[in-house]
Image: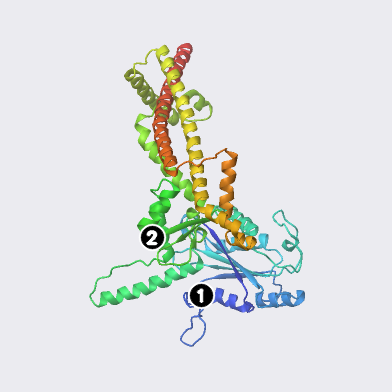
Amino acid sequence: MATLKHIASKNSDYTAIEAYLVYQHDEFSGKVILDEQGRPKLRESYLLDTLECGDFSFATACLLANRKYGKNTQHGDIKSHQYIISFDPRDAADNGLTMEKAQALGLKFCEENFPGHPAIVCTHPDGHNRSGNIHVHIVIGSIRTREVERKPYMQKPRDWREGMKHSSTAQTMRHLRVEVMELCEGAGLYQIDLLNGSKERVSEAEYWARRRGQLKLDRENAALTAAGQQTTQTKFETAKETLRKQISDVLDTAMSFEDFSDRLLQQYGITVKESRGRLSYLPAGRTKFIRAHSIGDKFEKGLVLAALQENAERKRTIQFKSDRIGKLVDIQAKLKQGKGIGYERWAKKYNLKAMAQTLILLQENGLLNEDALDQRIAELDTKFHRSLTVVKDLEGRMKANKELRYHVAAYTSTKNIAQQLKAAKQPTAFEEQHRAKLTAYRAATAYFKANNITKLPSPKKLEAEYAQLASEKAKFYEQYKEAKEELLKLKTAKQNVASFFREEEQAQQER
């Protein structure tokens, strides 16, 4: 499960990154840890190599490149890039990953993807969380010191020309993630799909906030335990972690977006809004919305809508599962496609069960005669299409009613403003001040004219008409749904009977 992380640095002190890779640092403050004599303590284990540095150190090679090409002279210039490849903790035990092997993979990755850049490749045996994940730091100077051969993934001259600066664009990161996945596959290591995001996105800042919060909580709990008091919380959660859990809780059961947003507000006080096709969430007590992208891909609009649709379909499946009849499997066709003997045994049992369900259905409905079955299917087909036609017509009338009610309400509420415009001493200023209401008024009058409406209907009458249409639609929709379900079952039953006798006939011919 190798992951790839990128860090851009504006620090002009290139020796600082070398010191970080070689010496021990406090994981919270970032300061170098000193020994009893006040000297920096070396890391217990690491492997380090340099590339494209010639006879110089990495820091010197980068400074010479800056001077030669006249770049990285401003404080805001990116001086170096760091890419960290973290391997799965299981790779050491399951796939024989060692520090030496990881270092070799890191050197290969650097040579193939950052040619011409002064670079450090350093492997550490463990991460901050003590999970045992071997990881490789690849640090490159931002300036390429020689022109390199152009490769297919290189799109712009800066990607291969001498003296140009490396740019970590979205396209570059996509290419590098593919390279990491192929690197792991070639080495026989665990891997994940790095191209499709993560369901829960934890930023660097949130990671350290979680670590600091857990450390503080552990100290407080230790003090309570020493005082003989009982602890109430053992795991620290960031605000984003709590938000993820609350959204996930609602997302697991909601059936529509309206249901999703209503439950979030009622249960947890979370407001959800959509802007430019993206979702944002506002937890109770905050004044600034949190974008879905910053807490995880599963909370984005597309995946949220997909999850809601899946919930609705799962509910419908549970409701009608007991009434469904499975279609018979064409076993011979599947065997020709390469299915094995295990599949054949399963398919035979499945076909027996499906055929038993078919016979029970036909017997209960008195449709064992083929002519009676065909007649019933024809009746249901007619009822199905007739009900669907009525439902569509009612939906159209409901939509027209709703649109008319909207324009009647808009006209009634803005008519006074339109009359005031005629008597205004400064019509231009008045219109600018009431532009929105006047626009709604003119849209309403245009709608009435286009539909030849000379006398406005009563809003109460329109609401009563809409309620009547909705009631009729519900009745015919129920007829449509019932006809559709029964029609589907009988068509499946007819197909199963035909398949069964066809297989019997083939078996007799073979005998």
Q: Is residue 344 above or below residue 505?
A: below
Residue 50, image x and y in percent? 64, 70
Q: How many marks?
A: 2
Nearest the viewer among 463 and 122 is 463
In this figure, which residue is indicated by the disc labeled 2? 269
Q: Quadrant of residue 53?
A: bottom right
Nearest the viewer among 14 and 471 is 471
Helix, strand or loop under label 1: loop
Residue 67, image x and y in percent? 74, 78
In this figure, which residue is indicated by the disc labeled 1? 43
Q: Amino acid at mark 1?
A: Arg
Q: Amino acid at mark 2?
A: Gly
Q: Residues within 10 Å of mark 1 (few under 14, many from 20)?
A: some
Furthest residue in direction bottom, as rendered: 37
Q: Quadrant of residue 71?
A: bottom right
Seen in the image, is 353 located left or right of residue 290?
Answer: left
How did the renderer colour the structure?
rainbow
Nearest the viewer among 11 and 280 is 280
Seen in the image, is 93 located left or right of residue 224?
Answer: right
Give the alpha-carbon distance from disc 1 to disc 2, as whole Å: 48 Å
Helix, strand or loop under label 2: loop
> Which one is earlier in the sequence, the residue at label 1 or at label 2?
1
Nearest the viewer among 422 and 334 is 422
Residue 228, image x and y in percent? 22, 75
Residue 42, image x and y in percent? 52, 78
Q: Residues within 10 Å of mark 2 (few under 14, many from 20)?
A: some
Q: Quadrant of the C terminus?
A: top left
Q: Is residue 323 above or below residue 207?
A: above
Name the residue located 57 percent from the left edge and 43 percent from the top edge.
447
Furthest residue in direction left, as rendered: 228
Q: Is residue 6 above or below residue 368?
A: below
